[in-house]
Image (cartoon, rainbow, N blue to C red):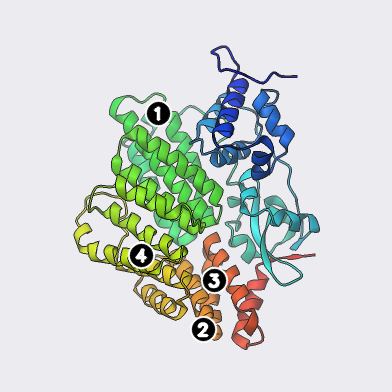
Amino acid sequence: MGQRPKVLTPDQSPVHRFGYMLREFREARRYSLRGLAEKAFMSHSKLQKWENGERAPKDRAEVELVDSLLQAGGVLVDLWERINPPVSAPGRVSVSAPHVSEASIGLAMAGAQQAASDHEGTFVPARLRDGSVVFVALDRRSMLRGGVGIGAAAAFGMGTPAVADTEVVQGLKQPARSAAAYNGTPIEHFKRARRLLIDNDNLLGPGHAVKTVREHIEHIKHLRRDAKGVDRQALMELQTQYAEFASWLYQDLGDFDRAEFWLDRAFQWSHTVGDSDLTSYVMARKAQLAGEKRDLVDVVDLAEAAQRMARPRSRLAAVARTYESYGHALRGESTDSERAIDDVRNALDRVSSDTTPWGVWLNEQYVDVHRAQGLEVLGKHTEAAEVFTDAIKALPEGYHRDRGVYLARAAVAHAGAGSPEEAATVGLQALTVANDTGSGRIMRELVRLDRALVPWQRQPEVSDFRENFDAVLAHEA
């Protein structure tokens, strides 16, 4: 039986160091062992053995989730990397056909957090016998064997076997990398790769990019070992940018826990880089993610913090103010929400000359869709639908996934405004984009739409949407 470490000493093993810091973070965040175990969807005894140094964590994804829950900023993950256990597959619920067992339905009620503790599982929307839709953990390999509808697979980045292996990346031992192998410099190579991945993300969706992004983070970390001076600093900055992008990809997949984890890493690393604009941008992204999660407590506070960190009257301050507007709407603060969005609109001309590379997409259409989001949350459905429609028309070519997200949100607004035919027609367009790109954000909006259309389910347009939406869902047995 291992002994619970009382103090941290230089001669302790990496396993005991991990356990000591785990306990320190848990107690600082005022979690009991059982409380943290419930949040992390693991057994109380396993967590206790981790803390006591009796057992090394085997699954990186579990460590990532615990790190995120404790707001440890990647410290626990870094300690886990020093232990370097063999990669192992965690237990999971598997299905081999497009039906969901009673046990799986029980898991569905746990919500999306479980996705972050199962590195080979994913959450897909499933129709229960009562007609409602929940997100259920399914085994990826079983999905590919068992023939869950191609729409459901594509809607979560599952269209090809290559995509199905996105998570087993960081636990693998990486080979040595030579900077001399690159045409130009490795920094230029990974910068070009990141630009291409960002461009392709909007056309192809997050599932096709997330594995590559995580691999590139590992490659950059290995190159940093031998880099010196400005090259080492530039690689650290690039590693931070990739971490923020990884967060965005997971956010679009609908995996908010991993999105939060990678934003925490980016925030930590940005302080090492010393780029105040980058740190301000990551803080603004934290506010955006809180809004996506409908976190009534944090979204405004995070947005205000980002504005304090940003240069006065800068583009990044305007970006953060945009997310603050949505936070006020979530709280039901209509006047504050409209005032914030008007401030951003009035700042657009001024910030257009800002030289920072962050937030360059802040334009009139971006502001409009966030205003529409706020209006829909505040119950002003007709006005929200009109603003969404105008913004969608003004979107430039190539914004395929973003168009799908806005279409799905517009459809929800149409339903709220009592226009079920229009809602169903627009929702069907969004469903097509969801299948093209694998955007979990679109699917989550379509789940909302499916619920909103229940009163009109016998109308032909609504029936057509629900039939097509149903075809991409798993079903309770």
* Amino acid type shown at disc 2: Glu
Image coords of residue 247 (percent x, y): 47, 48
- Callout 1: helix, strand or loop? helix
Res 266 → quadrant = top left
Sequence-wise, which precedes: disc 1 or disc 3? 1
Category of crowding for the residue at label 3, using alpha-carbon neighbours closer than 10 angstroms: few (below 14), some (14–19), many (at least 20): some
Image coords of residue 155 (percent x, y): 58, 62
* Amino acid type shown at disc 4: Asp
Residue 396 visible in image = no
What separation in Å lies between label 2 and label 4 (alpha carbons)? 30 Å
What separation in Å lies between label 2 and label 1 (alpha carbons)? 53 Å
Image coords of residue 78 (percent x, y): 52, 29
Seen in the image, is 183 located left or right of residue 331?
left
In-front residue for pair 449/344: 344
Seen in the image, is 152 located left or right of residue 227?
right
* Amino acid type shown at disc 3: Thr
* Amino acid type shown at disc 1: Arg
Image coords of residue 64 (percent x, y): 57, 39
Which residue is denoted by mark 2 in the rendering? 422
Which residue is denoted by mark 1 in the rendering? 224
Which residue is denoted by mark 3 in the rendering? 432
Seen in the image, is 115 located left or right of residue 211?
right
- Callout 2: helix, strand or loop? helix
Quadrant where the C terminus sits is bottom right
Sequence-wise, which precedes: disc 3 or disc 2? 2
Which residue is denoted by mark 4 in the rendering? 336
